[in-house]
Amino acid sequence: MPGKIQACVHLVMYHPTKDTIDILFEACLTYEPGQMEPIDFLEGNSKSNDFSGSVVWILGKDHFLPKCIDDLHKDISSRLWLSYRKGFQTIGNTNFTSDKGWGCMLRCGQMILAESLIRLHLGRDWLCSEDKENIIYKKILKLFEDKRSCTYSIHQIALMGVCKGKTVGQWFGPNTIGHVLRQLSTFDSWNDLRIHVAMDTCLTKSDVENVATMQLEDLQNFYDTGKHPSNRLASWRPVLVIIPLRVGLCTVNPIYVEYLKACFECEQSVGIIGGKPNQALYFIGYAGEEVVFLDPHVCQPCTFTDEMEDFDDSSYHCTAPGRIPFLSMDPSLALCFFCKDEREFKALCVFLEERVLKDISSPLFEITQHRLHTRENISCRTVSAKSYSKSQGDEQMVCSSPSSEEEYELIEG
């Protein structure tokens, strides 16, 4: 039982007033059943949890402990934490005024995108504690407020999901959230961010180049038809690269753990969309044999930046991230990388080829210059069957059509 709920139960037992009962009811609404109250991921008494003298990697940046412990906490707390909210206007024609119980993957997608926008406008070294009055930061935060008018709000994501066959209130998986964010980005002229979702466990360089050099108004038609426009931009636009994968059948295959670690060490890393059974999580790094995450399952009242003069943004920053063993992760996930320009994308490809895809018989994915027209050289097997997970139904489905947005490869190993 979470500590907050336990304390409320004790209060009600000895002071059973209407107010204390209301407090208990509110506490029970805040935490999902089985959800642990957040604790600092560096805390713990077991020997395996002692990170003194080791390195903690967070989104491409290393922190040596205990020397850099303060810098580590500042770094983590500067990431935008987008969790369940309650009390917002209904979504479409539904009665939903909260995304508690179904919006965790949508929130993880928001966090990946928010990190990319922070990286684009403010840089990887930006610290919220030192620059929280930054106008650009507030403008980014406003994009994710729980209003339909906001570009990347829970309303917009859930309603765009309807176009992908998802009813409002239905769970998303890593692949679906990637495609939904890709569609929404075509309406975001301020950031002019491009999102590429790699298909068939293959990152195709020419596809990324096409997206990065395409006019914003041509992107939607390209996504719908695959036809390339004749006019191109002279320079690259920033690109968020999402690579959906399965790294095992029912559990993570241990041979891939070191390669997942390497992904967190990449300068272009903006994290991994994934989770553990029944819960989506935003993975931001690792410490030893455990992966560090921000948890969207804490339900908070919705807040708006334009409703108060001195806006309190503390509910958008997590000071107590969690950690789980790599092998406890759900095998359905998506690697995410942000490239500000062509140079960064080329550097990303070099890093992946040397650190993630080298010296392994069944690599996580492949990198090719052009799209493959045959599947003979893909080092994984396609299973034309449906195997649904309670937490991430569509993402465990592998379709026979290689063009399907829901296709997944089950990696051998």
Image (tube, grey):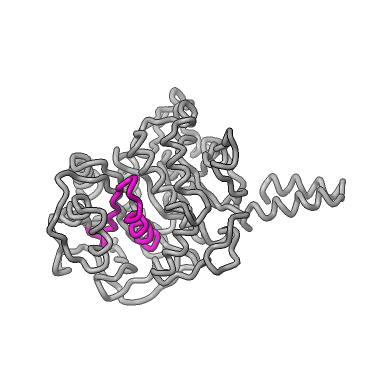
Residue at position x 16%, y 60% in the image: 229
Q: Quadrant of the C terminus?
A: bottom left
Whether the magenta-drawn stretch holds residue 386 is answered as no
Whether the magenta-drawn stretch holds residue 197 is answered as yes
Give how far across and how far down residue 237 sits, in percent. Answer: 24, 46
Residue 74, can we see it? no
In this rendering, would 158 be left or right of 61? right
Give how far across and how far down residue 5 sits, in percent. Answer: 71, 49
Q: Which residues are magenta?
A: 175-202
Q: Decide: is 49 above or below 361.
A: above
In the image, 360 versus 87, the foreground residue is 87
Residue at position x 48%, y 26% in the image: 70
Q: Which residue is situated farthest in the top direction here? A: 67
Q: Quadrant of residue 289?
A: top left
In the image, 157 versus 49, the foreground residue is 157
In this rendering, would 82 be left or right of 182? right
Residue at position x 39%, y 43% in the image: 115
Q: Decide: is 90 above or below 137.
A: below
In the image, 98 versus 401, the foreground residue is 98
Q: Decide: is 125 above or below 387.
A: above
Give how far across and how far down residue 404 sits, in percent. Answer: 29, 71
Q: Quadrant of residue 204?
A: bottom left
Q: Quadrant of residue 191?
A: top left
Q: How many numbered marks, from 0 up?
A: 0
Give how far across and how far down residue 84 sits, in percent. Answer: 56, 53
Residue 159, can we see it? yes
